[in-house]
Image: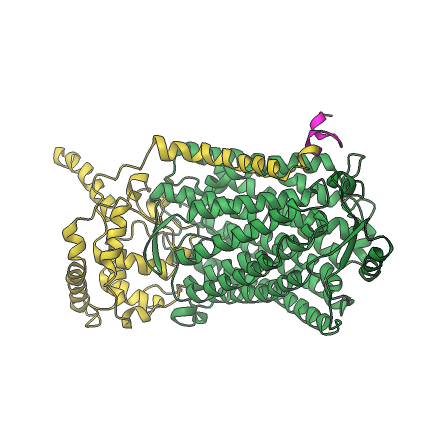
Chain colours: A yellow, B green
C-alpha cells in the first residue's frame, strides 16, 4: 500500500493542515480549467467573424433581448449539428464564425420545439405575429405558450444606445452614428415591418409594439449565413 | 442523549474548571436552514409540477409572468440554489461544528449567510418571472444579484474556514474535504461565468462571445452540478450515513482516492455538453474522455456509501432515514454511470436536445440530492427539536410515494427522449426525412408528458407528507431549545494533539470511523 494512503501516512498529515489542503484542492480544479481555456482564449483568440457577419440592427437587438427575457432558449436551440437529418430539417450546420458577436450565446440545450438558427425568411412577418399571438393558429398541435402580450405591450427602445455602447466595448463593431441614431433607426425598421404585416392582412398599428422587434430578430436568424452560402455558390452558378 | 451530555458538560467546570472548557453548538441556524429547505423545496417542486402541466396542456401558461419560458429558470434556481442550497448549508453548519468540535466561527456571519441567501432567493423569485435574466443556464440571475451571491458566499467561506481554524480536532474528516472543495470551486465557477458588462440595473452582456461563452457556460453548468449538487452531498453522505447506520465508513483509502480524483477530473468534463456543436473538436473530445474517466471516482463515492452499510442492512427495515440514503446513493450511482454514457459522442448524437437529459438530471436531482436531503432532515429533526418524529408511518409513505414518483418520471422521460432522438433522425427509403414536420414528434411524446406529470405530482405529494410531519413534530417540540453544550479537555500548547486522541472520526485500522465522540 502506498505510504501516502496509510492510516498514518502523508495524507493523514495533510488532513491536519486546512490551508495546504485548500490550496491543493484549488490547484486540482484549476488544472483542467486552465488546460481547456488557455488555447481557446490565448491561441485561437477571439473567433474571427464570418465574412458576411453584420451586427444586429438596433431593433433586432431589442428583439433578441425579448427572446432572452421570454426564455425562448429554454425550448429552442440555435445550433445546427453537422448531421444529415439536421441539415435537411434546418439548413447548413452552425460554425464558430457565425457567433463572433453573440453575447450571450443562445445555443440552448433542449429542443422542445425546433431549432431556430436558420429561421430567418422561412415565414412571412404575419406568420410570426399570428404564431406568437396563438401558436396553434399557425401550427396545429403546437404546445408552445401563447404570447399575446407582445402584441399589446409598447416597446421601450430608450436603452438601446446604452446597450450598443456596452456591446461595442465587448467587440461588436457599432459605429458612433448607429449608436446616436439607434432609436430612430429602430423606429424606421419597426414601421416597415408593421406596414408589411398590415399589407399581408394582419393587425394594424404594431410599429410600437414588442412583437415587431421580436419578428425583426427572428427574421434575421441565419440570414448572414445564407448570404455567405449565396456568395460562395454564385461563381458555380455563373459557370453553368 | 444530548441532554445528558449537556448536563455533564455544565457540571464539569465546577469539578475542575482548569481542565475542561465548555462550549456550545449553534443549532438555531441549522433549524432555520432546515425549515427554509422544506419551504423552498415545496415551492420549487410546485413550480416544476406547473411546468410539467404546461407541456402537455399549454392552456396552463398563465399569462406573461407565469409562462414556461420564464418559470423554467425559476424552477431550476429554486430547486438547486434554494432547496438543495439550504439543505447543504444545514448539513454543513450541523456537521462542521461537530467535526471540528467548535461552534461556528461567528454567529453574526451565520445569520448574515442565512438571511442573505434567503434574500437572494426572493430576488430571484421576483426578477425571473419579470423576464430579468441573463439566459445562461443555472446562472440566470442578473448582475446585482450575482454580486450579492458573491458577498454572501465570501461570508460563508470566512465563517467556515474560521471554524476550521479554531477547531479542536487535529484531523479533518472526509466530509470537511468535500465542503472545502465545494466552497472554493463554487466561488471560482461563479466568478468565472458571471463576468459581464452591465448596461443598466437589470441588464448585462457577458464578456464572452459565441464559442467562448458556450464553453465558459458549460464549464460552469457542468461543475455547478459537480460542486453544488455532488461534492456537498458526498460530504453530507459521509457525515450522516455513518451516523444513521451507526457504522464507520467503509474505506478511508477509498475516500482519499475518490476525493482527489473526483475534484481533479470533474472540472474537465464541461464541454461534453457541447458535442457536435461549433466548439473545437479537441475540446469536446477531451470533455468526453474525462467524463468517462469520471465514472470511477463517482462510483468510489457510491461504493464507500453503500458498503458502509455492510452488516447493517437489516436496519433499513425500521429506518426511513437509511432507506432514503440507500435509494439516494443508488440513484447517484445510476446517474453517474449514465452521465459518462451520455457524454460519448455516438450516444450524445441521439440524446442531445431530447428529454433524455431531463430524465438524467431528475434521476440525479430527485433521486440523489432530494432523497439525501430528506434522509438528513428525518435524521436531524428529532435531534434539532428534541422531539420524536411525529409519524414514522407518514415518513415511510413519503419514501414509497417518492420512489415510485421518480421511477414514473424518469421512465416517461427516457421513453420520450429516445422517441424524439429516433424520430428526428429517421429517413424514408428515398432518403427524405420520415417526420419532416417537427410537430409530429411533439404529438408522439405528449402522452409521456402526462405520465411525467403524474410521477412528479406523486413526488410532490411525498414532500407535502414531509412538511406535515415536520410541522407536527416542531409543534410538539419544547419551547426552549438551548444550544447543546459540550465539554472538552482544555487545550494546552499541544492543542490539536490532545484532542485528536479523543476520536476525530478516523480509525487507525485504515477505516474511517465516522462517529465523533459527541453527537
Q: Residue furthest top?
A: A2
Residue B496 lies, with reference to residue B403, above or below; the image says above
Quarter holding the C terminus of chain B?
bottom right
Residue B470 lies, with reference to residue A43, above or below; the image says below
Q: Where residue B240 sits in the image (x, y, percent)?
A: 72, 52
| Magenta stretch encompasses residue B56 | no
Q: Is residue B344 left or right of residue B89?
A: left
From which residue to which does the magenta span run?
Answer: A3-12
Residue B225 lies, with reference to residue B65, above or below; the image says above
Residue appearing at x 50%, y 58% in the figure: B76
Seen from the viewer's position, the closer of residues B76 and A147 is B76
Q: Main secondary structure of the magenta part?
A: helix
Seen from the viewer's position, the closer of residues B486 and A184 is B486
Q: Where residue B193 sits in the image (x, y, percent)?
A: 43, 47
Q: Residue furthest right?
A: B15
Q: Can you see residue A19? A: yes
Q: Where residue B430 sits in the image (x, y, percent)?
A: 36, 43
- Quarter location, residue B275: top left
Residue appearing at x 28%, y 70% in the figure: A151
Q: Is residue B106 left or right of residue B171?
A: left
Quarter holding the N terminus of chain B?
bottom right
Q: Can you see residue B518? A: no
Residue appearing at x 85%, y 57% in the figure: B14
Amino acid at each position: 500500500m502506498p505510504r501516502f494512503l496509510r492510516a498514518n501516512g502523508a495524507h493523514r498529515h495533510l488532513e491536519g493542515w486546512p490551508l495546504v489542503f485548500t490550496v491543493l484542492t484549488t490547484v486540482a480544479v484549476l488544472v483542467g480549467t486552465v488546460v481547456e481555456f488557455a488555447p481557446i482564449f490565448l491561441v485561437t483568440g477571439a473567433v474571427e467573424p464570418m465574412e458576411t457577419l453584420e451586427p444586429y440592427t438596433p431593433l433586432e437587438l431589442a428583439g433578441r433581448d425579448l427572446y432572452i427575457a421570454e426564455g425562448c432558449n429554454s425550448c429552442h436551440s440555435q445550433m445546427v449539428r453537422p448531421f444529415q437529418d439536421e441539415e435537411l430539417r434546418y439548413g447548413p450546420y452552425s460554425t464558430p464564425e457565425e457567433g463572433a458577436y453573440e453575447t450571450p450565446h443562445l445555443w440552448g440545450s433542449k429542443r422542445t420545439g425546433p431549432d431556430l438558427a436558420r429561421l430567418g425568411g422561412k415565414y412571412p412577418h404575419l406568420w410570426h405575429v399570428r404564431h406568437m399571438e396563438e401558436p396553434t393558429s399557425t401550427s396545429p398541435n403546437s404546445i408552445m405558450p401563447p404570447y399575446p402580450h407582445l402584441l399589446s405591450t409598447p416597446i421601450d427602445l430608450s436603452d438601446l444606445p446604452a446597450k450598443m455602447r456596452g456591446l461595442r466595448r465587448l467587440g461588436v463593431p457599432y459605429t458612433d452614428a448607429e449608436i446616436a441614431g439607434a432609436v430612430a433607426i429602430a423606429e424606421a425598421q419597426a414601421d416597415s415591418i408593421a406596414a408589411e404585416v398590415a399589407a399581408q392582412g394582419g393587425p394594424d398599428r404594431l410599429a410600437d409594439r414588442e412583437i415587431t422587434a421580436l419578428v425583426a430578430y427572428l427574421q434575421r436568424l441565419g440570414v448572414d449565413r445564407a448570404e455567405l452560402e449565396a456568395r460562395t455558390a454564385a461563381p458555380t452558378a455563373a459557370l453553368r | 442523549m444530548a441532554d445528558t451530555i449537556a448536563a455533564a458538560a455544565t457540571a464539569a467546570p465546577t469539578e475542575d474548571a482548569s481542565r475542561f472548557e465548555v462550549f456550545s453548538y449553534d443549532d438555531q441556524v441549522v433549524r432555520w436552514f432546515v425549515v427554509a429547505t422544506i419551504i423552498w423545496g415545496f415551492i420549487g417542486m410546485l413550480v416544476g409540477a406547473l411546468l410539467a402541466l404546461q407541456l402537455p396542456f399549454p392552456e396552463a401558461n398563465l399569462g406573461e409572468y407565469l409562462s414556461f419560458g420564464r418559470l423554467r429558470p425559476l424552477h431550476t434556481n429554486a430547486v438547486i440554489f434554494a432547496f438543495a442550497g439550504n439543505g447543504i448549508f444545514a448539513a454543513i453548519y450541523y456537521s462542521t461544528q461537530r467535526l471540528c468540535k467548535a461552534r461556528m466561527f461567528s454567529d453574526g456571519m451565520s445569520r448574515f449567510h442565512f438571511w442573505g441567501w434567503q434574500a437572494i432567493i426572493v430576488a430571484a423569485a421576483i426578477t425571473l418571472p419579470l423576464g430579468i435574466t441573463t439566459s445562461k443556464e443555472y446562472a440566470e440571475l442578473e448582475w446585482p444579484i450575482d454580486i450579492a451571491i458573491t458577498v454572501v458566499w465570501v461570508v460563508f467561506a470566512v465563517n467556515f474556514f474560521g471554524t476550521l481554524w479554531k477547531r479542536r480536532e487535529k484531523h479533518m474528516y472526509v466530509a470537511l474535504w468535500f465542503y472545502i472543495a465545494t466552497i472554493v470551486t463554487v466561488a471560482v465557477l461563479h466568478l468565472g461565468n458571471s463576468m459581464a458588462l452591465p448596461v443598466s440595473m437589470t441588464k448585462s452582456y457577458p464578456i464572452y462571445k459565441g464559442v467562448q461563452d458556450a464553453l465558459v457556460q458549460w464549464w460552469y453548468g457542468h461543475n455547478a452540478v459537480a460542486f453544488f449538487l455532488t461534492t456537498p452531498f458526498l460530504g453530507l453522505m459521509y457525515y450522516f450515513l455513518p451516523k444513521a447506520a451507526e457504522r464507520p465508513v467503509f474505506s478511508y483509502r477509498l475516500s482519499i482516492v475518490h476525493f482527489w480524483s473526483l475534484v481533479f477530473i470533474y472540472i474537465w468534463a464541461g464541454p461534453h455538453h457541447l458535442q457536435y456543436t461549433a466548439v473545437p473538436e479537441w475540446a469536446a473530445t477531451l470533455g468526453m474522455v474525462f467524463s468517462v474517466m469520471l465514472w470511477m471516482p463517482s462510483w468510489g463515492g457510491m461504493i464507500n456509501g453503500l458498503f458502509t452499510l455492510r452488516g447493517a442492512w437489516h436496519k433499513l427495515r425500521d429506518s426511513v432515514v437509511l432507506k432514503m440514503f440507500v435509494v439516494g446513493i443508488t440513484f447517484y450511482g445510476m446517474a453517474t454511470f449514465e452521465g459518462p454514457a451520455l457524454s460519448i459522442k455516438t450516444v450524445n448524437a441521439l440524446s442531445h436536445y431530447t428529454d433524455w437529459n431531463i430524465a438524467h438530471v431528475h434521476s440525479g436531482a430527485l433521486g440523489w440530492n432530494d432523497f439525501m436531503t430528506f434522509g438528513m432532515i428525518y435524521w436531524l429533526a428529532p435531534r434539532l427539536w428534541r422531539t420524536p418524529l411525529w409519524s414514522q408511518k407518514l415518513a415511510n409513505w413519503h419514501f414509497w410515494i417518492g420512489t415510485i414518483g421518480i421511477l414514473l418520471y424518469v421512465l416517461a422521460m427516457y421513453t420520450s427522449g429516445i422517441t424524439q432522438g429516433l424520430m428526428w433522425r429517421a429517413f424514408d427509403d428515398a432518403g427524405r426525412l420520415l417526420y419532416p414536420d417537427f410537430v409530429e414528434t411533439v404529438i408522439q411524446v405528449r402522452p409521456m408528458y402526462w405520465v411525467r406529470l403524474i410521477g412528479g405530482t406523486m413526488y410532490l405529494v411525498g414532500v407535502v407528507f414531509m412538511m406535515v410531519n415536520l410541522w407536527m413534530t416542531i409543534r410538539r417540540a419544547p419551547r426552549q431549545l438551548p444550544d447543546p453544550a459540550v465539554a472538552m479537555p482544555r487545550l494546552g500548547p499541544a492543542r490539536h494533539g490532545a484532542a485528536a486522541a479523543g476520536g476525530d472520526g478516523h480509525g487507525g485500522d485504515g477505516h474511517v470511523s465516522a462517529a465523533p465522540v459527541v453527537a
